[in-house]
Image (tube, rainbow, N blue to C red):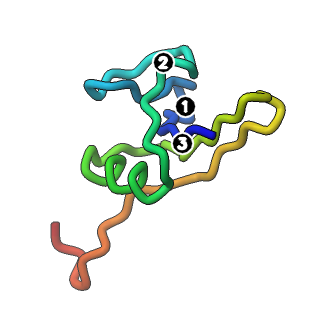
């Protein structure tokens, strides 16, 4: 299984070098959801999900992720 970051609106996948590509096989594998969330937050990506890719594409699925500010006072 691979864990990718997918732009939900454009149906693109984040690739190495932080470029967006249309082919799922060229997406960057973050290996874990934690690594993918951390990277998406660092990029301040909006409207993305964590997309899980399996050898059999019928099992692929996305988990919505919304960037948020986790600081207690809301400051960045």
Horizontally, residue 57 falls left or right of residue 40, namely right
Between disc 2 and disc 1, the foreground one is 2
Horizontally, residue 51 falls left or right of residue 69, namely right
10 Å crowding of disc 1: few (<14), some (14-19), many (20+)? few
**What label does residue 3 carry, if any?**
3
Quadrant of the snapshot with the C terminus: bottom left
Answer yes or no: do the residues labelled 2 and 3 have beta carbons within 8 Å?
A: no
Task: Describe the element under mark 2 as helix, strand or loop.
Answer: helix
Q: CA distance from mark 2 to mark 1?
A: 18 Å
Answer yes or no: do the residues labelled 1 and 3 have beta carbons within 8 Å?
A: no
Of marks 2 and 3, which one's residue comes earlier in the chain? 3
Above/below status of 35 relative to 57: below
Quadrant of the snapshot with the N terminus: top right
**What label does residue 9 carry, if any?**
1
Rendering coords of residue 21 (x, y %): 45, 17
Answer yes or no: do the residues labelled 2 and 1 have beta carbons within 8 Å?
A: no
Residue 20 location, quadrant: top left
Of marks 2 and 1, which one's residue comes earlier in the chain? 1
10 Å crowding of disc 3: few (<14), some (14-19), many (20+)? many
Above/below status of 37 relative to 51: below
Between disc 1 and disc 3, the foreground one is 3
Task: Describe the element under mark 3 as helix, strand or loop.
Answer: strand
Toward the right, the furthest residue is 58
The residue tagged 2 is 26
10 Å crowding of disc 2: few (<14), some (14-19), many (20+)? some
Of marks 1 and 3, which one's residue comes earlier in the chain? 3
Q: CA distance from mark 2 to mark 3?
A: 12 Å
What residue do we see at 56% from left, 35% from top? 8
Rendering coords of residue 33 (x, y %): 50, 55
Rendering coords of residue 29 (x, y %): 46, 35
Toward the left, the furthest residue is 76
Q: CA distance from mark 1 to mark 3?
A: 18 Å
């Amino acid at each position: 299984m691979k864990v990718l970051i997918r732009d939900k609106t454009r149906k693109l996948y984040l690739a190495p070098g932080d470029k967006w590509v249309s082919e799922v096989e060229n997406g960057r594998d973050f290996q874990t959801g934690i690594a993918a969330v951390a990277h998406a937050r660092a990029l301040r990506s909006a409207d993305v999900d964590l997309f899980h890719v399996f050898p059999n594409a019928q099992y692929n699925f996305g988990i919505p992720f919304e960037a948020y500010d986790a600081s207690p006072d809301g400051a960045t």
